[in-house]
Amino acid sequence: MTDNFKHIQSAHCENGVITKLLRLAGHDYMTEPLAFGLGSGLFYIHLPYIKFNGGPAISFRTMPGRIFKRTCDSLKIEVSSKKFRDEQKAQEYLDNLLAQDIVVGCQVGVFNLTYFPPEYRFHFNAHNLIVYGKENGNYLISDPVMDKVSILSAEELNRVRFAKGMLAPNGHLYFIKKTQPISEELIRKGIERGIKRNVRDMLYIPGKIAGVDGILYTSNKIRTWRNKLGVRKAGHYLGQIIRMQEEIGTGGGGFRFIYAAFLEEAAKYCQNDNLLKISDEFTKSGDLWRQNAVNMAGILRGRSTEQKDFEQIADVMVEIYHIEKNAFKQLKEIEFR
Amino acid sequence: MKKEETPQDKSVLNNISSELYYVKNSDGTYNTSSSTGWNVKQEALDDAWSEIRERVENAKIAVEHGKKSPIFYYMEKNLMDISLLSSYVKFSKIRVWWHLRPSVYKRLNTHIIQRYAKVFSIELDDLNTLK
């Protein structure tokens, strides 16, 4: 396994690990957007009251781990996953799997991840990587967001596998246990299910903070930030939104482009041109998110700090809200054969 | 986003890795494209770090003025709060909070301080020098 392992770079870590593991298991049609769509990865949530790194807690995707679970579920692939209390046992378990030539996905925290640039090392615990071998006591790592493979010593790997805090990994590892050939029919069914679940999550989740309504919620908050927090802190909050939206892992525009790419693939599988049209809507939404990031950076850097600049950002978010709401409504109407 | 719009700005990722974007080809289909970084993102990241540096600087002043123990400085420097630090050193939150007081810190035995030093990846003696 060690010699012929081919690293693939992907935009997001979790999708990347699924894609690679499934491909190794013989599902070579698997792509990152397809995995993302089958797992209904697109989401939006703004958690009130909670602060994350001193800014608003916003996420553009579904809970860590969900995409993996849903994708494998819908393709009827059996996965084994395990968490540990004891570092030593966790390492032995991993060594044992590697000795059987099994490629393993691991959840880690990035704060002590040595090959990451220091500026990216925050206490974020839902990062995923692949361990594909052990050589001279060091682990061979394929991190999907990096463009090449890396190496971690046993001590370094244990440290990140047992990072603490929110979503602590507790040595969480997972691998594919059993798989069978998958028919196109099953993929089509998976796509239908993935899309329907995503429609439900974005349109019908109760409350105002999640789904497309969440975008409106953030937009209304932004209008008040300048008066409530002052320009500097408001700028810092907006900076946090930019980072959640664009930081390595999203493929740009808060995952909207990946989702658009998924719909394009889905259109091919299902031979349905309507999906292509809706894909364009998500491209449009992603472009607006990015344009808005430019405006937010303007405030952050003190280039434009009037109330009207905050209003402008909020207005663009309202526009995004309407586009995405409409797009999901159209998705709901799609007839799958 | 079109393929030719993929940002190629300077960023902290340079020399470490590129990153992947999903972009539209000229024929309107999706593809991936490699980027060296984006100014807008870099600015947001710089802002986050300038805020952290400010916090660490304030912590340093507080320790030098005898208002906090060195553990407080290293806690801020490692971007931690009491709750996160407590789960790393495996002391209760209230105990960590107690250790942040200079008068308490002075009386702590090396065994306890060693646990903090290990979490911060520093030598025992470095704890008193605020690097």
Image (cartoon, coloured by chain):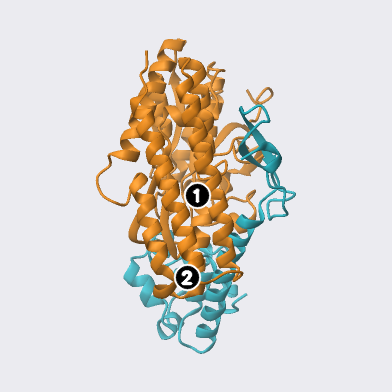
Chain colours: A orange, B cyan
**Which chain is home to disc 1?**
A
The amino acid type found where label 1 is placed reads Gly
Residue to which mark 2 is pinned: A307
The N terminus of chain A, quarter of image: top right
What residue lies at 59% left-to-right and 60% top-to-bottom? B45
Q: Is residue A12 left or right of residue A182?
A: right
Tell me residue A185's x, y (percent): 42, 11
Q: Secondary structure at mark 2?
A: helix
**Which chain is home to disc 2?**
A
Marks 1 and 2 on same chain? yes
Residue to which mark 1 is pinned: A109
State the residue in front, B112 or A125. Answer: A125
Tell me residue A335's x, y (percent): 35, 19
Establish if B116 lies above or below A46: below
Q: Secondary structure at mark 1?
A: loop
Establish if A229 lies above or below A77: below
The C terminus of chain A, quarter of image: top left
Establish if A116 lies above or below A187: below
Q: How many marks?
A: 2
Tell me residue A166's x, y (percent): 39, 53
Disc 1 crowd, CA 10 A, few/some/many (<14, 14-19, 20+): many
The amino acid type found where label 2 is placed reads Gln
Residue A91 appears in view: no
Q: Which mark is residue B106?
A: none
What residue lies at 37% left-to-right and 40% top-to-bottom? A325
What residue lies at 35% left-to-right and 44% top-to-bottom? A211
Disc 2 crowd, CA 10 A, few/some/many (<14, 14-19, 20+): some
Among the two numbered marks 1 and 2 on one chain, the one whose residue lies closer to the N terminus: 1
Residue A81 appears in view: yes
